[in-house]
Image (cartoon, rainbow, N blue to C red):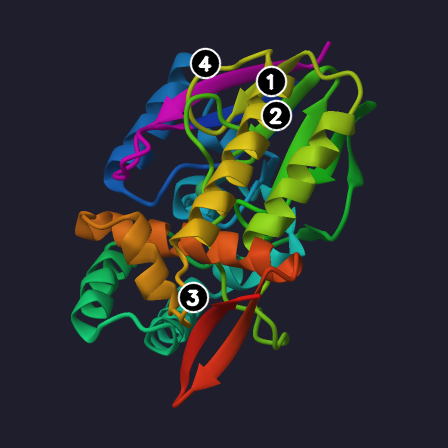
Amino acid sequence: MVDILSFKVPTPYPVGPVNLYLIRAGDVNVLVDTGPNTPEARQSLEKNFQNLGLSIEDMQFIIVTHAHQDHMGLAGWIKEQSGARICTHVRNMYWLTDYKGEWERQRNYFFNFWKKNGVPDEIIQKMNIYWNFFKEHSISTSVDCYVEKDSLFMVGTKEIEIIYTPGHATGHISLKVEDRFISGDHLLLDITSNPVIEPPLPEESERPMSLPMYIESLERTLEIKGIEEVYPGHGEPFINYKKVITTRIKHYMNRKKTVYKAMKSKPMTLYEICKSIFPDLPDNQRFLALSETQGHLDLLLVEGKVSIEEKDGIMYYVKQ
Ligand SMILES: [Zn+2]
């Protein structure tokens, strides 16, 4: 059996610490995810390795499950010391190889996106403060191998199955190692993964629909055979993952109904719909609430239950 060790690294986010996994097959070490680029996370990583009788230089591979700062932030720092080869999904390329550029591109995209969706200027400014908070939490690095779809990653004679599970992030991958499933943020036990909206890649024109993608990935995960235990990106490992998945899908179906009910007969903007569902929100939760509402509108758009009308540069959703 392949050894999988795990340890926690602190993050400055409400989600709490992130779990890193070290897959050891013979003398090959594969680190899954890295923690954010903060002094606390760097110290914790060094200490965790020491406790295992290892050092950062002993890493040969880093697999990044998705391009969120708590999962990718230290990839470049670890690579500098160890020469480890970095592997991830191709949709994470810009965040990993041009972090500041992508940070800025997305900030500009969202500025226009929120404006078009009826969000008042003062709220956009407040969300920008939160965006700034992430600015130093990762660094640019080079990536050695990209996957596009489900792939096999060989470590000596051992197989790591890379499974494309987009939704929480559109470049999200999960790993199946024998009977264990390293799920990143695709499957968490106590927290509902937020399928955060993302801009299209620079070479794309349409925004990917994160929530419809996520529900499809959840349904696909139910079909995977031979999973005994799930090792998540946050929280403790769990075995009742099928129940977790069906509960999640039910939750989203109920929320979708709530969003539909919140819509009046007149055209409404994303902001107006979000506000009627979440009237009082702390500033640091606005992005997630708008993102979630957009996700449900995307589901309703796919089902043909709502349509979009544009007037004076503002998008309005209309019930069909
Ligand atoms: Zn994440």
Which residue is label 3 attached to? Answer: 265
Q: Position of residue 181 (x, y in %)?
A: 65, 23
Q: Where is residue 27 in the image (x, y as percent from the top left)?
A: 67, 20
Crowd rating for badge 4 (residues with CA inside 10 Å; few <14, some 14–19, many 20+): few
- The local secondary structure at tag 4 comes to loop
Q: What residue type is labelled 2?
A: Thr
Find the distance from the CA under tag 2 to the CA under tag 4: 37 Å
Q: Which amino acid does label 3 sit on?
A: Ser
Q: Which amino acid does label 4 sit on?
A: Leu
Find the distance from the CA under tag 1 to the CA under tag 2: 5 Å
Q: In screen coordinates, is 129 left or right of 70? A: left
Say if mark 2 contacts mark 4, CB within 8 Å.
no
Whether residue 263 is visible here, answered yes or no, is yes
Q: What residue type is labelled 1?
A: Lys
Residue reaching furthest to the front: 265
| First of labels 4, 1 by sequence position | 4
Which residue is label 1 attached to? Answer: 243
Whether residue 25 is visible here, answered yes or no, is no
Residue 246 shows which numbered tag?
2
Q: Which residue is nearer to you in this view: 231 or 275? A: 275
| First of labels 3, 4 by sequence position | 4
- The local secondary structure at tag 3 comes to loop
- 142 relative to 65, above or below: below
- The local secondary structure at tag 2 comes to helix
Q: Where is residue 255 in the image (x, y as percent from the top left)?
A: 46, 41
Which residue is label 4 attached to? Answer: 52
